[in-house]
Structure formats: C-alpha cells, structure tokens
Amino acid sequence: MEFDELYQELILDHYKHPRRKRAIPEGEALVDEENPVCGDHIRLFWRVEEGRLRDVAFDGHGCAISMASASMMTERLEGADVETARRLIEAFIGMLRGERAPSDEAMGDLLALEGVREFPMRIKCATLAWHAAEKALNRAQASSLARASGS
Ligand code: ZN
C-alpha cells in the first residue's frame, strides 16, 4: 500500500468511526465553530482537572476532513496538559499553513492531514476543530485571569 493510501485510510477511518464524538448540548459546549465555505460545524467540550484536559469530546457535522481532524484532535488532547495542548494546536495550524516543519514524532497520525495543504479550499476544514480548541483555551485563560484580578 502506498504511503498516501495509508493516510487516506486513516482519515476515512476517523470519519466513519469518530473516536470522541458524542452529543454535546449547546449550553455545555465550550465553543461552537462553523466553516461556512464547506458547511462544517463543530462543538467542543472538555473539563480541566489538575491542569489537564479531561472528557474531551466533539459534536457536529461536516466533510470527512473536518470530522476526521476533530476526531484525531480530541484523541490527542485527552489527558494533555494545557500547555502541551496549546503547543500541539499551534504546531498543527502551522503545519497546514506551511509555516514550520514540526517534528514527525510530535505530530504522529496528524501528519495524515498535512497533504490537505495542497488543497487551499480544504485547509479551513482541517483546521476548524483546532481553531475552536484555541478559542476555548483562550477563553478559559481570560476568565481565570479575570477571577484572579477579582473582577
Ligand atoms: Zn469541510
């Protein structure tokens, strides 16, 4: 089997059997993001316990790339500490922008999505879940800063 085919298999497998997908009620979602160009829609949930992301889950609908990317991302973020999650998100979005070459070991299965770079219209599909996660982390940080300053 060709290397590319293996990657396609992996993407399709995550699309058909999403790993951490469950129904997330609107009020429970940390973020709600859409990619109107393709019609992808995603919600994310996790809770932070002792600095680590737990019960990471996604909900939504969309193309194979957006859903596979969300499945792979939630799998990687489960149990990760906040800083590691942030670095992984930056590395992934950077990889899709072609801005930097992350180490292959650090990216693991996520390299399957690197090829999306060749299809500019689909880059937003691949990064939708990641931008949503970034937004959720930033919001959590902003609200804990607000609490710390007593406002
Ligand atoms: Zn899409």
Image (cartoon, grey):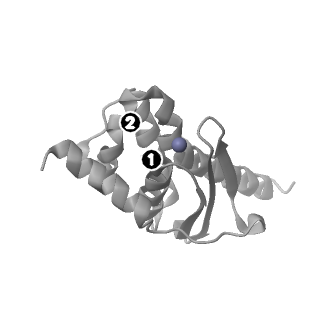
Extreme-right residue of the structure: 151
Q: What amino acid type is highlighted by mark number 1?
A: Ile
Mark 1 vs ligand 1: CB under 8 Å?
A: yes
Q: Residue furthest left?
A: 1
Q: How far is mark 1 from mark 2, CA to CA? A: 8 Å
x and y percent of residue 149 in the render?
80, 53
| Residue identified by numbered label 1 | 65
Which quadrant of the structure image shows residue 150? Answer: bottom right
Q: Position of residue 110 (x, y in %)?
A: 34, 49
- Whether pointer 1 and pointer 2 mark residues with C-beta atoms closer than 8 Å, the reply is yes
Seen from the viewer's position, the closer of residues 9 and 96 is 9
Image coordinates of residue 76 in percent, x first then y, are 41, 60
Image disc number at residue 77: none
Q: Is residue 76 above or below residue 88?
A: below
Using residue 69 as the reference point, say whether residue 12 is left or right of it.
left
Is residue 56 positioned above or below 125 on the image?
A: below
Residue 147 lies, in percent from the top left, at: 79, 58
Residue shown at 63% from the left, 71% from the top = 23
Residue depicted at x 72% and y 69%: 25
Front residue of 101/40: it is 40
Q: Looking at numbered disc 2 in the image, what kind of residue is underneath it? A: Val
Q: Secondary structure at mark 1?
A: helix
Q: How many marks?
A: 2
Please indicate, yes or no, whether residue 89 appears anywhere in the rendered image.
yes
**Which label number is shown at residue 116?**
2
Say which residue appears at 12% left-offset and 50% top-offset. 1
Residue at image x 35%, y 61%? 13
Pointer 1 or 2: first along the chain? 1
Front in this rendered view, residue 88 or 7 = 7
Res. 76 visible in picture: no
State yes or no: Cβ of the residue under disc 2 lies below 8 Å from any atom of ligand 1. Answer: no
Q: Kindly indicate the quadrant of the structure image that contains residue 103.
A: top left
